[in-house]
Amino acid sequence: MLLAACVSQKYQCVRGTLCVVLKACALAPAVIEVLANCYPQLQVAESWKAVIPEEVFQMHQTFYQSFFALARTPRCLQHLCRSTIRKSFGKECFYIIPLLPLPKSLQNYLLLEPEGVLH
């Protein structure tokens, strides 16, 4: 619930701060995924790979490959739409989204449920 409260706030993403979070939470890619999905765009640096121990990178290779791909590609339209929808609902998104007549999988996507990859 604390994570949900944190992502509902309007934080300004600072490159150095995200790198510190990446280092501290390398073993918990779901945390990094939720935080990364809070922003329409991220400026990921390839050099951040150095803060992730090699064995952790290998253990969560699919996620980290998708994370570092963001250094070379923009976020997908699906993610940008999710960001716009969440922004329009503001702090109430955690209460409104479950009430929408949408499939549960789409509700989960809008609520930032971790998928194991970033798009």
Image: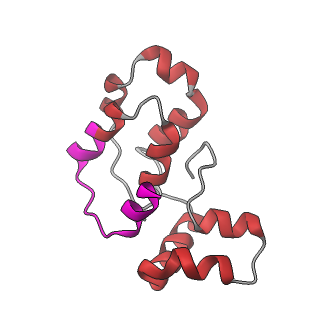
Expressed as whole percent of the image width and height from the top left, the position of residue 1 reads 47, 58
Q: Please name the residue shown 57% across and 27% down the image.
A: 61
| Displayed quadrant of residue 77 | bottom right
Q: Residue at x 25, y 63 (%)?
A: 12
Relative to the observer, which residue lies in front, 36 or 27?
Answer: 27
Residue closer to the observer: 32 or 66: 32
Q: Please say which color scheme the image uses.
A: secondary structure
Q: Residue furthest top?
A: 55
The residue located at (61%, 78%) in the rendering is 97
**Magenta: predominant secondary structure element?**
helix
Instruction: Say left or right for 98 vs 83.
Output: right
Asked if 13 appears above or below 23 in the picture, the reply is below
Residue furthest to the front: 1
When asked about the image quadrant of residue 96, the answer is bottom right
Position of residue 16 relative to residue 62, above or below, is below
Q: Position of residue 60 (x, y in %)?
A: 56, 28
Residue 86 place in picture, x, y as percent: 50, 76
Tally of numbered discs: 0
Magenta region includes residue 26: no
Residue 2 to residue 82: above or below: above
Up-down: is 103 above or below 69? below
What is the span of residues highlighted in magenta in the rendered image?
1-20
Taking the magenta stretch, the answer to whether it contains residue 5 is yes
Q: Is residue 39 visible?
A: no
Name the foreground residue: 3 vs 47. 3
Q: Is residue 62 visible?
A: yes
Q: Position of residue 65 (x, y in %)?
A: 53, 34
Which residue is located at x 40 percent, y 18 percent? Answer: 53
